[in-house]
Image (cartoon, rainbow, N blue to C red):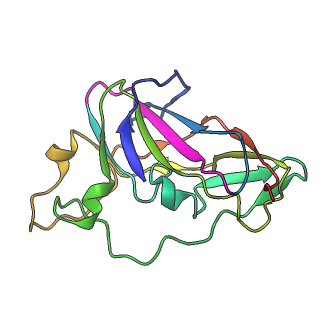
Amino acid sequence: MSGVLDTNMAASSPISTMSSPALSVSLALSSSNFSSSEEVELSVTVISHASAPITIFTWPTIFNTRLALRRKNFECIDLDTNTPLNLEITKGGKRGGFTSRSDSGDAKYFYTLMPEEPFKFTTPFNIANRDGVIPGHRYRFGVRRGEKLEYWTAGTKEEVLTPPGEPAGLAKNEDGPIELNDINDIEFVIKASDT
């Protein structure tokens, strides 16, 4: 998974909650017609409409794109048969509690979103070889209903991470989660492999 500032992002629908910042999120594939041997990239781009920087913790979310493609964060439907494709191939592994300490392994899952600046998370879109995928069929891919961003806080990553060695659990934001709704679906076709 990688994350980069995206300066070429088109406008997308805002995602609002009662007391948490509004976000716009969009999905894109680098190709919509590909074979299982071709490299295709999934990007999840987010824009914060908060008036100041916010920092998000991405581990259990769609923004941890590589893991999310192996869990239940996304849904995929075979449009030719109207059959859901099972994307979950892992629960994400056993791990200890989340921490906000700057010297922890969790520090790499914290990203700062600056107001109105697109930030893109990317990963290889490697579902073409999954069980149930039928070459030549058309698929719709999108974010599972009910997805939320539970761990977020005001401030930059440098401001919110706890110094090395200090105790630092991770609590959900008291203003509530950011609901991830109204995100565009994307459609694609898996071509038959060239032999």
Percent across and percent down for residue 57 are 34, 52
- In the figure, residue 46 lies in which quadrant? top left
Percent across and percent down for residue 171 are 30, 58
Q: Is residue 46 magenta?
A: yes
Q: Is residue 193 magenta?
A: no
User: On the rendered structure, is 82 left or right of 62?
Assistant: right
Q: Quadrant of the C terminus?
A: bottom right
The residue segment tinted magenta is 37-52
**As rendered, which of 3 and 85 lies closer to the eye?**
3
**As rendered, which of 59 and 28 lies closer to the eye?**
28
| Farthest-out residue, top | 11
- In the figure, residue 48 lies in which quadrant? top left
Q: Relative to 110, is 49 above or below?
A: above
Residue at 21 percent of width and 40 percent of height: 156
Residue at 46 percent of width and 75 percent of height: 93
| Farthest-out residue, bottom | 94
Total numbered labels placed on residues in the image: 0
Percent across and percent down for residue 19 are 39, 35
Q: Relative to 170, is 180 above or below?
A: above
